[in-house]
Image (cartoon, helix red, strand yellow):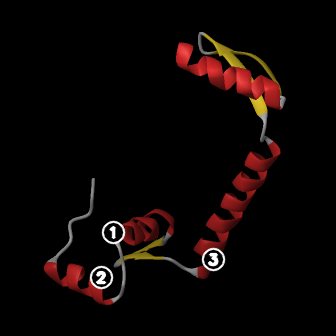
Amino acid sequence: MAMQLTNHARVRMQQRSMRGEDIKLIEMYGTPVREGYLLRRKDVNKEVALLKRRIHRLERLENRAIIVENNCLITTYPASKSTQKKMLSMRNGR
C-alpha cells in the first residue's frame, strides 16, 4: 500500500529534491523511529554490503546454466558461448 502524501509533504519533497522512490527506500531500509523512519549511515552501509555480495555472486555465476523440468532442477553447468547461443535461439520455441 502506497503511503499517502499531504500537500505539505509534496511541496517539501519538491523543495528538497526527493522522489517517491526515495521515500520508499528510506521506508524499506531505514530504522523505524517513533516519528517515522531514519536512514542512518549504518543502515546504508549494511544494504550496500548486501548489494556488493549479491553483485559478487552474480559475477561469479556469469555464463552458468541450470536445466529445469517440471519445477525440478536437473543439472547445472558452465555454458560455452556456442551453448548459450543455441539455448537463446531455442527459447522462442518454448
Nearest to N terminus: mark 3 or mark 1: 1
User: Label 2 vs label 1: CA separation?
Assistant: 8 Å
User: Label 3 vs label 1: CA separation?
Assistant: 22 Å
Task: Name the outermost residue toward the left.
Answer: 7
Relative vertical location of residue 62 with respect to residue 25 in this rendering, above or below: above
Residue receiving disc 2: 13
Residue receiving disc 3: 42
Residue 42: x %, y % from top left: 63, 77
**Quadrant of the frame with the C terminus:** top right
Residue receiving disc 1: 20
Front residue (pair 9, 84): 84
Question: Residue at the spot x=65%, y=25% of the render?
Answer: 88
Number of other residues with Cα within 10 Å of mark 2, as a class: few under 14, some 14 to 19, many 20 or more: some
Residue 93: x %, y % from top left: 55, 13
For the question of whether residue 10 can be seen, the reply is yes
Q: Tag 3, which secondary structure?
A: helix
Q: Quadrant of residue 33?
A: bottom left
> Label 2 is placed on what type of residue?
Met
> Label 1 is placed on what type of residue?
Gly
Residue 61: x %, y % from top left: 78, 40
Relative vertical location of residue 37 with respect to residue 75 in this rendering, above or below: below
Nearest to N terminus: mark 3 or mark 2: 2
User: Label 3 vs label 2: CA separation?
Assistant: 24 Å
Nearest to N terminus: mark 2 or mark 1: 2
Q: Tag 2, which secondary structure?
A: helix
Frontmost of labels 3 and 2 is 2
Q: Quadrant of residue 92?
A: top right
Question: Residue at the spot x=64%, y=22% of the render?
Answer: 89
Front residue (pair 86, 43): 86
